[in-house]
């Protein structure tokens, strides 16, 4: 009989675990409290694949970061996910910071980081001419890279789904009860029974851990806020530009996105409410002030949006990964903050192999390859666009003018194995609404297509699930009695 495995949390870690486990003979269910995967920290981070130089040797962060970063290029190629090995520079502006660079270099070499060295100011300015000329030196990390975190999460989910993993959204796990044979998960949608559970719940992972284990943990939500600048044919920087790190993290950086935008941030502020993703004038001012040290010409006049993400900081400062002590059948990933994205492939592989080994799972005879995704219309040649239109005339209807996204691509995003069900889900899968106007022109048409594909009314379409409805109804359906009720 196949064991039933329930994975709690549909971020990049949960989806990486699901994909790896889908190669084994088991009934697997992934549940998430949101309306989609990648709705937590996985959609709101810097998108960096860190090389692994800034974590102490022997920690889980160092171990999984280095392992995961080495897996990224082949993984993204396999999954058809954007990836670029653009490198990173950690800047020093005084002798004390130069000493920090030497410490990071030594630590990186001990951790097994490849292609890492300290370079002088002339080399820095040759690589990045817009850098502050007061720079004295930099740690040059050629093996650092960038990825689209939400596109990776969607691709992992799709691959897991076609290999048999079921997904259940809008399902919040309120508590877990250990039974003689397995577990009962109490959720807002009813009880779920499981033989094995895998806690990948991000901000909520500590609370679930503490319900099962006598060894308590403490998770602090740590907010990071960002600016996103409009895309250019050539962004002002090609490397990820760091300043020397602090105890609160890697600090405010400047990094190009894989779609030619420029990202500034994040800040780091501990908060009480792990769902508070608002941005503040104070934090955004801090970003502007700090980034001018790296980039004296810094200007946010081309900013198209600001956003924030919440990372789960555990009091011990390290990842907690593996089996829950004293609770057979329970596994977890707790305190996953940076470099969580960089570590995700290695964490997924490690946990799947641990669970399979502990429970005697057998590999499937046939593990299906990832699904094929069409080339983005905006990246097609004129000949390819013509061929695409002839095969599907919906390619002739450009819905998002900023990003040149067609109706065909939006319908494909909704029809993927784990498809979009919200406006934000469409946006992050195919970039409709990601551009300069931030959906000001295309959102109404995206809503219509969602309504058609999902067979729901326009008032049922949401921005990001839950109560994020965009329209209340049709004007012609309003009655005097209804108006009085709404008043």
Image (tube, grey):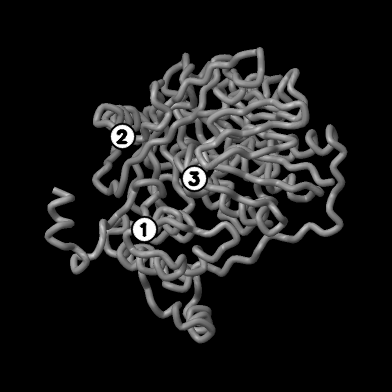
Q: Tell me the SS state at disc 2.
A: loop
- Pointer 2: what residue? 279
- Pointer 3: what residue? 170
At horizontal 65% and vertical 13% (from top left) the residue drawn is 215
Q: How far apart are marks 3 and 1 (CA)?
A: 15 Å
Residue 11 seen in the figure = no
Side (left or right) of 455 relative to 49: left
Relative vertical location of residue 158 with respect to residue 410 in this rendering, above or below: above
- Pointer 1: what residue? 460
Which one is earlier in the sequence, the residue at label 2 or at label 1? 2
> Who is closer to the viewer here, 444 or 429?
444
At horizontal 46% and vertical 83% (from top left) the residue drawn is 393
Residue 306 seen in the figure = yes
Please rate how many residues cluster around mark 3, counting C-alpha atoms within 10 Å: few if below 14, some from 14 to 19, many from 20: some
Please rate how many residues cluster around mark 2, counting C-alpha atoms within 10 Å: few if below 14, some from 14 to 19, many from 20: some
Which one is earlier in the sequence, the residue at label 3 or at label 2? 3
């Amino acid at each position: 009989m196949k064991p039933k495995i329930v994975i709690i949390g549909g971020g990049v870690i949960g989806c990486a675990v699901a994909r790896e486990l889908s190669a084994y003979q088991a009934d697997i269910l992934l549940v998430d409290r949101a309306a989609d995967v990648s709705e937590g920290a996985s959609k709101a981070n810097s998108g960096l694949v860190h090389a692994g130089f800034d974590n102490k040797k022997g920690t889980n962060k160092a171990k999984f970061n280095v392992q995961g970063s080495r897996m990224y290029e082949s993984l993204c190629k396999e999954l058809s996910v954007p990836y670029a090995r653009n490198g990173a520079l950690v800047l020093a502006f005084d002798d004390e910071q130069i000493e920090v660079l030497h410490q990071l270099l030594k630590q990186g070499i001990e951790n097994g980081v490849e292609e890492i060295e300290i370079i002088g100011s002339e080399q820095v300015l040759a690589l990045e001419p817009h850098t502050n000329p007061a720079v004295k030196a930099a740690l040059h990390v050629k093996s650092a890279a960038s990825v689209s975190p939400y596109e990776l999460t969607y691709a992992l989910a799709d691959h897991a789904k076609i290999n048999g993993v079921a997904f259940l959204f809008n399902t919040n796990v309120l508590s877990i009860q250990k039974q003689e044979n397995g577990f009962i998960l109490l959720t807002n949608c009813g009880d779920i029974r499981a033989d094995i559970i895998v806690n990948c719940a991000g901000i909520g992972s500590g609370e679930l851990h503490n319900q099962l284990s006598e060894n308590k943990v403490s998770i602090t939500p740590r907010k990071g806020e960002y600016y996103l600048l409009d895309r250019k044919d050539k962004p002002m920087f090609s490397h990820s530009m760091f300043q020397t790190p602090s105890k609160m993290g890697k600090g405010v950086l400047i990094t190009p996105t894989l779609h030619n935008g420029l990202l500034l941030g994040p800040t780091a502020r501990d908060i009480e409410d792990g769902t508070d993703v608002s941005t503040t004038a104070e934090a955004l001012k801090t970003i502007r002030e700090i980034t001018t040290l790296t980039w004296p010409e810094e200007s946010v006049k081309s900013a198209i949006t600001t956003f924030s993400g919440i990372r789960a900081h555990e009091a011990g400062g390290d990842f907690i990964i593996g089996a829950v002590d004293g609770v057979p059948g329970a596994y977890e990933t707790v305190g996953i903050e940076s470099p969580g994205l960089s570590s995700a492939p290695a964490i997924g592989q490690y946990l799947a192999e641990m669970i399979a080994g502990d429970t005697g799972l057998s590999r499937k005879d046939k593990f299906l390859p990832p699904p094929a995704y069409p080339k983005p219309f905006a990246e097609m040649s004129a000949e390819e666009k013509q061929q695409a239109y002839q095969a599907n005339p919906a390619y002739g209807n450009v819905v998002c003018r900023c990003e040149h996204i067609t109706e065909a691509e939006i319908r494909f995003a909704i029809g993927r194995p784990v498809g979009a069900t919200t406006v934000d889900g469409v946006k992050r899968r195919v970039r409709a609404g990601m551009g300069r106007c931030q959906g000001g022109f295309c959102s109404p048409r995206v809503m219509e297509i969602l309504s058609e594909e999902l067979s729901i009314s326009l008032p049922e379409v949401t921005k990001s699930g839950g109560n994020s409805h965009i329209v209340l109804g049709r004007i012609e359906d309003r009655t005097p009695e209804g108006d009085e009720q709404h008043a």
